[in-house]
Amino acid sequence: MKNRMVRIVCLLLAAVMMLPASPVMAAEQDTAVILQLGSEILLHGREESAIAAPYYAPNGAVMVPLAPVCEALGASVQVDAGSGRATVQGNSSLIFTAGHWSYFSGGTAQTLASPPVLAGNTFFVPVQALRSLAGVYVHTFGYYDGGFLVLSAAPLTEGDLAGAPNENFSSSAPDAALLQARKRALQTFGPNRGLFDRSAILLRQDSCSAWVAGKEVQISPPGSSYAPYQSPDGLVMLPLRFLTQALGGSYQMWDDGTAVVTYGGHIAAFPAESGSITVDGVKTEHADFGSARKDGEAFCSLAAFTAALDLYGATDSAANGIVISPYSLAKSPALQAAAWSRVQALPRNAAGVAKGYLALTFDDGPSGKYTTALLDGLQQRGAHATFFLCNYRIASYPDLMGRYLAEGHEVGNHSATHAQLTKLGAPALAAELDNTNKAICAGTGTSPVLMRPPGGAYHSAVLQALQARGMDCILWSVDTQDWKYHNTQTVTDNILSVVRDGDIILMHDMYPTSVQAALRAIDTLQAQGYVFVTVSELARIKGVSLQSGQVYHSFR
Ligand code: ZN
């Protein structure tokens, strides 16, 4: 229900953004400075310049590069690398020191949401601190609204969002001027992953599953014929009723076989067996438009669907994938790649294709180059895995956090400090769980539901703490002992000699031998017909509904 609401809100926003800007608004936004989390672009009026990308600090604060942002706002910045100090001179003066939780604004000490960071030649500060520059307003669009930061000389909305705490990082009831700024930002930056996940639909030819708003859903029961398919003349055909409902529109089929979709204030008609669409009474024909009826269900071509509903579509022949989004991905090759990776994880229809499903799990990371090599290898193989992360390591490798979910993997909690949870009192146990959940949420945009206790050690208090957080306790059925045997062949054999359908395999992406063994085992097992999925996917495939506070060793 919640996802559906978010989707509808996204679509309403998309509809509102079609309205023309008033001249007053246009003047306001021409001076605004707009950035996006993770994007190396600064948009100032109509000008684009290259910057170091804004990012989330491990505690959730939004960090921006000080010099280019302040200079665009008309202030000068001096950075003294030796003392780690940055001085901003504008309508007011600010002094920041790298690593310090406070700064000076006109001689008065103020607290920061996170300490400034001097990385290479770039000095980053929490964006909200720039409110201290007289006459600067900071507006934020949350992660699921595109992760945009709008800094302006005038408030763009009545209830300025400047007071919103960083951690929530969400906008409320933005007005038309702010939405216009966001529309311009979307055209420049494209969606970020959060916005894309919440609004895109990913389909796979011949699959009865789809990704909708970041979740895998069933299009129709397995074995039915409502999956997307390729027509004899090469058009990618989509199930119209499912797509319309996924977008929050309404669908009906008339007696003459015409399918009628109401969406975004428009009415689109798809006549049966036709190369035309009719939108708000205007008929359009195109060689790529097509519709068909199969087992009583209406199908239409991707081109007809996206043209009728004013959406963006893309296909990938290698992944047999289809992506439909309210936003153009033209500037987001990384999002497209992530989409195809996810599509490959959607189960194919043909019964008996997979010999079995396995969940590889990797504990104790992230670990820099080994995790990077593993993620690269998994991506090349279209294999997905689950990573149980420790908070103290997330802080060391924040750059990796953007890859896991984007490449179709799952992330779980492996405590903050790798403490044995059964030895902790309630407050320390809560801190181990909550700090890691918070860091994972800050890095991936999603709070984990899976927990693997270090050493597999748990007792009733641990399970109660997990249940209170809606989390499950995931153990394993295959122990590779890769931490003990730093030998690729031994670890590979430890997998291949015992593995069977439904297993959860325990590994650590901490050693080069573990990474090589995992990839070698994947090559062998994929050739035998095994498919590598995440723990949650494995549970779903095996018909198990995960219950919080419960312990799972496998889904055999
Ligand atoms: Zn561990």
Image: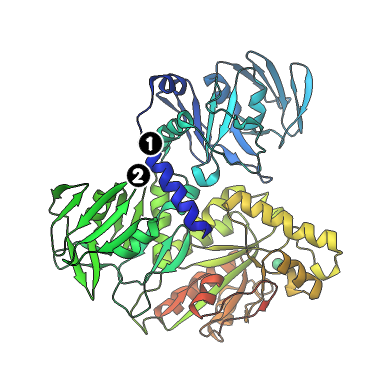
Residue at the extreme top of the image, as rendered: 91
Where is residue 446 shown, x and y percent of the image? 58, 55
Q: In the image, what residue occupies the spot 28% across and 56% down?
A: 261
* SS label for mark 2: loop
In this figure, which residue is indicated by the disc labeled 2?
328
Graded by Cα atoms within 10 Å as few (under 14), some (14 to 19) or many (20 or more), the crowding at tag 2 reads: some
Number of numbered labels in the structure image: 2
Q: What residue type is labelled 1?
A: Gln
Residue at the extreme front of the image, as rendered: 255
Q: In the image, what residue occupies the spot 36% across and 81% down?
A: 353
Where is residue 220 shown, x and y percent of the image? 36, 73
In this figure, which residue is indicated by the disc labeled 1?
187
**Viewer-side residue, 407 vs 119:** 407
**Viewer-side residue, 174 vs 213:** 174
Where is residue 527 shown, x and y percent of the image? 40, 79
With 135 as the anchor, is 38 left or right in this view? left
Q: What residue type is labelled 2?
A: Ser
Taking the image in four quarters, ligand 1 sits in the one at bottom right
Graded by Cα atoms within 10 Å as few (under 14), some (14 to 19) or many (20 or more), the crowding at tag 1 reads: some
With 467 as the anchor, is 371 left or right in this view? left
